[in-house]
Amino acid sequence: MTIDGRIARGDRTRAAVLDRAVARATEDGLDGLSLGQLATDLGVSKSGLFAHWRSKEDLQLATVERAEQQFLDQVTRPALTAPRGVRRLWALHDRRIAFYESELLPGGCFFAKVQFEFSVRPGVVRDRLATTFTLWSDFVDNLARLAVREGDLRADTDTRQLAYELESFALTAVMQSRLLSPEIAYRYARRAALDRLRTLATDPALLPEDLA
Amino acid sequence: MTIDGRIARGDRTRAAVLDRAVARATEDGLDGLSLGQLATDLGVSKSGLFAHWRSKEDLQLATVERAEQQFLDQVTRPALTAPRGVRRLWALHDRRIAFYESELLPGGCFFAKVQFEFSVRPGVVRDRLATTFTLWSDFVDNLARLAVREGDLRADTDTRQLAYELESFALTAVMQSRLLSPEIAYRYARRAALDRLRTLATDPALLPEDLA
DNA sequence: TAAATGAACGACCGGTCGGTCGGTTACCCC
DNA sequence: GGGGTAACCGACCGACCGGTCGTTCATTTA
């Protein structure tokens, strides 16, 4: 099983384009993405892009997929190393905010930006984003339900409601961080989640005492 | 003091254009707004728009101003009829969600959409939005401080933090309402705020018992 | 009634957009 | 070493973009 150098080259190009596309989309949106600019930025030709994706919409879908992978690698998977229960919920939120803080993406969060862009624009991109968000929401809900089963959270916890609130705090952080002061926004987002989890936790000592 | 019919006509046109611009911007964003489409929609010529605004950026600024006015009329001012304190805070949040529910704007919320669009795009529009948001944030904070002074909220309430959380719940509602189910999103947004206010209120009876 | 004014129009500009097409280059396999 | 194939390129297209210009028309003013 030898490696085809041509295909490897194509894979490298695809990866580079998608990384760039994810980053740029956090600034100008998925639709604001111009294929010509994207190509120029990467030192390739515009027509070269069409060799990999048949249309702009194709590229947009691939970009969403890449962003999902990135989020999984940078946020979700690391958070799963935390112990089951309320600590894992907190780890997920904390990691997420840390990811925004890292400035790895200039606009902060790909999904926040793109969901607002496409939430009222019917099409396959919107549908894909809706599916992704539903899966994410279910995932957080499952973590919360697990925390209830583990006895970390009060038995009468509304896990869906909790997932909504955690989502709110993170989403707002990424918006306010770019419009006002980042440090303040992230502190609010962490504090809000910590307070909320503490009121629901059976043993608040599982959560960090206060924020640095 | 007679009325100049020509100027009155211009005023009518300007108002119609801006109303339409606010509505469309909630769908396609302020930059996604095309002057040609906007003109066609309203049955006027594109060049006619330039008689009222010198550039697209000028029109964008005027559109922001119009949206502020609309929000003031539909949300802020009505909420001020509620009694000072925690009831007024709740009224503001409830009215805001109701405004989103009304579908008066197809995209739900002008500012949510546009803030995400311009938060990482330097320029006069972004600056204007940042100023508007700061004023709004201060306004909510002042309502909360007033509620503390009135004895409605616990004396150790972090009013800025509260303002952040209320903002979060509303912002997320408008996003999720268009991506998933509106009813569910709005219920989460109201429930979250109500729960939060109740934990801080000295007399929870001032708040509605539960949601319809 | 004639001059002045403000709103609105159609034609048009340079530029950019997404997308197409006919190559050229470089690598793989027989 | 020759044929096939995948990556990539430059030239080009029609559509649309924001914006300008000269003009028309209704109304106000002198």
Image (cartoon, coloured by chain):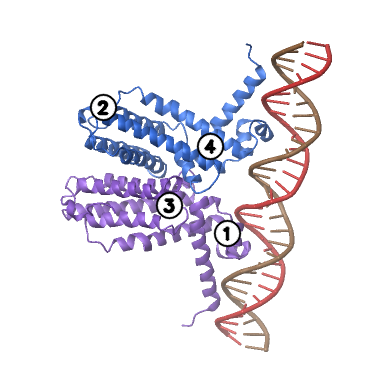
Chain colours: A blue, B purple, C brown, D red
Q: Chain of mark 2?
A: A
- Give the labeled residue for mark 2: A150
Say which residue appears at 57% left-offset and 40% top-offset: A33
The residue type indicated by label 2 comes to Glu
Nearer mark to the viewer, of 4 and 2:
2
Residue B194: x and y, percent? 26, 49
- Give the labeled residue for mark 4: A24
- Give the labeled residue for mark 3: B111
Q: Are marks 1 and 2 on the same chain?
A: no
Q: Mark 4 or mark 2: which comes first in sequence?
A: 4
Q: Mark 1 touching mark 4, by CB under 8 A?
A: no
For label 3, the crowd category at 10 Å Cα-Cα, with few meaning under 14, some 14 to 19 and many 20 or more, is: many
Going by the image, does A81 lie left or right of B145? Answer: right
Q: Chain of mark 3?
A: B
Figure label count: 4
Residue B181: x and y, percent? 41, 47
For label 4, the crowd category at 10 Å Cα-Cα, with few meaning under 14, some 14 to 19 and many 20 or more, is: many
For label 1, the crowd category at 10 Å Cα-Cα, with few meaning under 14, some 14 to 19 and many 20 or more, is: some
Say which residue appears at 48% left-offset and 46% top-offset: A119
Q: CA distance from mark 4 to mark 2?
A: 41 Å
Residue A142: x and y, percent? 35, 32
Res D12 → quadrant = top right
Q: Residue B38: which disc?
A: 1
Q: Mark 3 or mark 1: which comes first in sequence?
A: 1
The residue type indicated by label 1 comes to Leu
Q: Mark 4 touching mark 3, by CB under 8 A?
A: no
Between B55 and B107, the one lying in front of the other is B107
The residue type indicated by label 3 comes to Phe
Residue B162: x and y, percent? 27, 46
